[in-house]
Image (cartoon, rainbow, N blue to C red):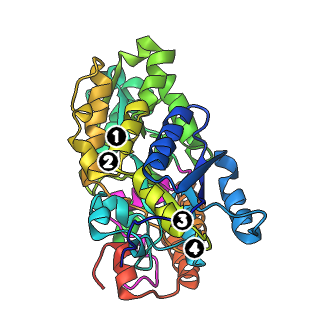
Amino acid sequence: MAVSCGAFATGVEVQFWTMQLSPFHDAYIRGVISSFEKQNPDVRVKWVDVPWSEMEKKTLTAVASASPRRPAPDLVNLNPQFASKLAEFGALADPEKFLSAEEIRAYLPAAWKANRLDGKTFALPWYLTTSVLLYNKTLLARAGVEAPTTFAGLLPAAQKVRATTGRYAYFPALDGSTPLETLVSMGASILSANGCRAGFVNERGEHVFNFHQQLYQDGLVPKNVVTEGHRKAVEMFLSGQVAMVSTGMQFLQFIKTNNPAFYANVGVTLQIGVGESPPNIAAMNVAVLDQSPNKKAAFRFAVFLTNAANQTEFARRVPILPSSTKSYDDPFFTTASGDRLLDEARALSVEQVKRGEVLVPPMRNYNKFRSDYARNLQAVMLNRKTTRQALSEIDTTWSALLPCPTKFAARAVSGTQP
């Protein structure tokens, strides 16, 4: 049941933490706060910006040591995976107890779903990102191939690029959550239907592991894919050693500024995997701490911060995408900017966000699952384990970490029926 948005107690102060938005976005954030305070004169918002690398530690410390003299933040800008850690321990307030049904419907369903754990919502979606595939037009033309939209199409493309140019077609970054995202993009499930075991200890999982092993053992990807990640992939793309890279549309401005000649040779298309699964999207959120004495005011500000007008204005300033459905009615998303490549990348990104999903939704023990999966995948790629050995070890490790959740939670994670 939603709490009405009437007057607040006099002198309410909402402490709002963001993740590395200052100083470049000071004017925007301060403008949003000023507009909110004019509409809600009984509330003041105190903004604190925290470096990306320190956010988890500072948030955990604030939650554990909060006191009247050192209050914890009321509203925090997080990502779903870290926020879900706090939600596991009941540290975050449920937005569905404070928002109306109409307010909830204002967000893209996939973005809202990205902030749920065990059937409960723990945060509001804020801005979104999605990767597109950038490609070196000259290298692909020399190889006589087009940029693939499926992983099934990546293998023959990689073989041709390597044979005709001596370069690599792709750098499958194994850092972050990328390996698990690729697993889902290739048609496998992270968890079993009942949520009690890994969902890819089967033929689909074997195909994913064997696919990566073939890429590596046949010399179709750089040897350092097992030790380095996205940063190296971008570096090798810019130097012409790799023909394609998965990255956000924001990277285009960096290329245009630093290497205009190379920029003219870049093409863009949908991310690899869209021919086999929904596009993957990444979400940032804002969460209200359950211990906050100002939850009602904090949620009112969170709704204001993430409304269609404010999210659209944010997207005008930086290459992010809104989680608000109505934002996409704004002409900004369809009006030509004069840069054909950037406009194409934005259009493809919007398309992916509208029909995409967060392929790796929040789950308990996520970091342990991610590292165990990546470690075993790398071992198979290096021929240190067979695929069957790796999957058997994953099955044992994951089963020990997975408490059997409710049927609802299992469907939410695996996307399958029990």
Q: Counting residues from the N terminus, which is met first, the one under dot 2 or under dot 3? A: 3
Q: Which amino acid type is shown beneath numbered disc 1?
A: Thr
Q: Which amino acid type is shown beneath numbered disc 3?
A: Val
| Circles 2 and 3 in contact, beta carbons < 8 Å | no
Q: CA distance from mark 3 to mark 4?
A: 6 Å
Q: Residue furthest top?
A: 261
Per the rendered image, the range of residues in magenta is: 174-201
Q: CA distance from mark 2 to mark 1?
A: 6 Å
- Quadrant, the N terminus: bottom left
Q: CA distance from mark 1 to mark 4?
A: 29 Å
Residue highlighted by disc 4: 290
Task: Report the number of numbered marks.
Answer: 4
Residue highlighted by disc 3: 288
Q: CA distance from mark 2 to mark 3?
A: 20 Å
Residue placed most toward the observer, 9 or 203: 9
Q: Which amino acid type is shown beneath numbered disc 2?
A: Ala
Which mark, by number, is residue 360? none
Q: Is residue 36 visible?
A: yes
Residue highlighted by disc 1: 312
Q: CA distance from mark 1 to mark 3?
A: 23 Å
Q: Is residue 149 visible?
A: no
- Quadrant, the C terminus: bottom left
| Circles 2 and 4 in contact, beta carbons < 8 Å | no
Q: Which amino acid type is shown beneath numbered disc 4?
A: Asp
Callout 2 secondary element: helix
| Circles 3 and 4 in contact, beta carbons < 8 Å | yes
